[in-house]
Image (cartoon, helix red, strand yellow):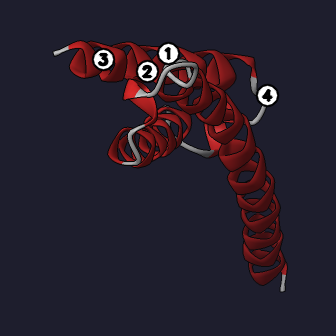
Amino acid sequence: METVWSLVIVVIVGVAAGLVVWAVDKRHSAYGIMLPIASAVASACILWIILVWAGTGYLTGLTWMPWVLPMAAAVAAAAAVPALVGRRRVKHDSEALTQLLRSFRA
C-alpha cells in the first residue's frame, strides 16, 4: 500500500508541474492544456513503474528513487514536450495562415 501512495503523490506532482508549465508558457494557445499535464503524468508513471518493478522501492538506501526520479522526469517532460510542440505548432500555423492569405490575394 505504501507504493500506491507514492504513485499518487508522483501523479499529483506531475499534474501540478503540467499546470504550471502551461500557465507560464506564452504559446499555450497553440496547444491544449492537457499536453503538458499528460506528458508529465505519463513519463512519471512509466518511470515509477520501471523503478518499482526493478525493486528500488524496497532496497535500503534506494527508497527515494521511486519518489524523486519520477517527479524530476515529470517536470522535465512538462517543460520539454510543450516547448517542442508549441514552437512547431506556431510555425506551422503561421505558414498555413500566410498561404491562406496569399491565396485570397491572388
Give the quadrant of the C terminus.
bottom right
Residue type highlighted by circle 2: Val
In terms of depth relative to the viewer, which is nearer, 72 or 85? 72
Give the mark nearest the N terminus, 1 or 4: 1
Which image quarter is the N terminus in? Answer: top left
Left or right of 80? Residue 9 is left
Marks 4 and 3, the one that precedes in the sequence: 3
Left or right: 18 as drawn, with respect to 86: left
As drawn, 29 above or below 13: below
Q: Would you say the residues marked 1 and 4 are in contact, meaning their CB atoms lie under 8 Å apart?
A: no
Residue farthest toward the front in the current orientation of the protein: 60
Q: Amino acid under label 4?
A: Lys
Residue at the disc numbered 3: 8
Could you say whether the residue bearing mark 3 is in a helix, strand or loop?
helix
Residue at x 63%, y 36% (from the top left corner): 73
- Numbered badge on residue 13: 1
Tell me residue 16's x, y (percent): 51, 14
Q: As displayed, is residue 36 above or below residue 106?
A: above
* Residues under numbered marks 2 and 3 in contact, where contact means CB atoms less than 8 Å apart: yes
Q: Residues within 10 Å of mark 4 (few under 14, many from 20)?
A: few
Residue carrying label 4: 26
Contact, CB < 8 Å: mark 2 with mark 4?
Answer: no
Spatial separation of the CA atoms under disc 3 and disc 1: 9 Å
Q: Give the x, y percent position of residue 30.
A: 65, 45
- In the picture of the structure, the residue carrying the numbered disc 2 is 10
Tell me the distance, in whole angstroms, between the alpha carbons under discs 2 and 1.
Answer: 5 Å
Q: State yes or no: discs 2 and 1 in contact (Cβ < 8 Å).
A: yes
> Residue at 74% across / 18% down in the picture?
24
Q: Is residue 3 left or right of residue 32?
A: left
Looking at the picture, which amino acid does disc 1 mark? Val
Residue found at x 48% / y 36%: 44
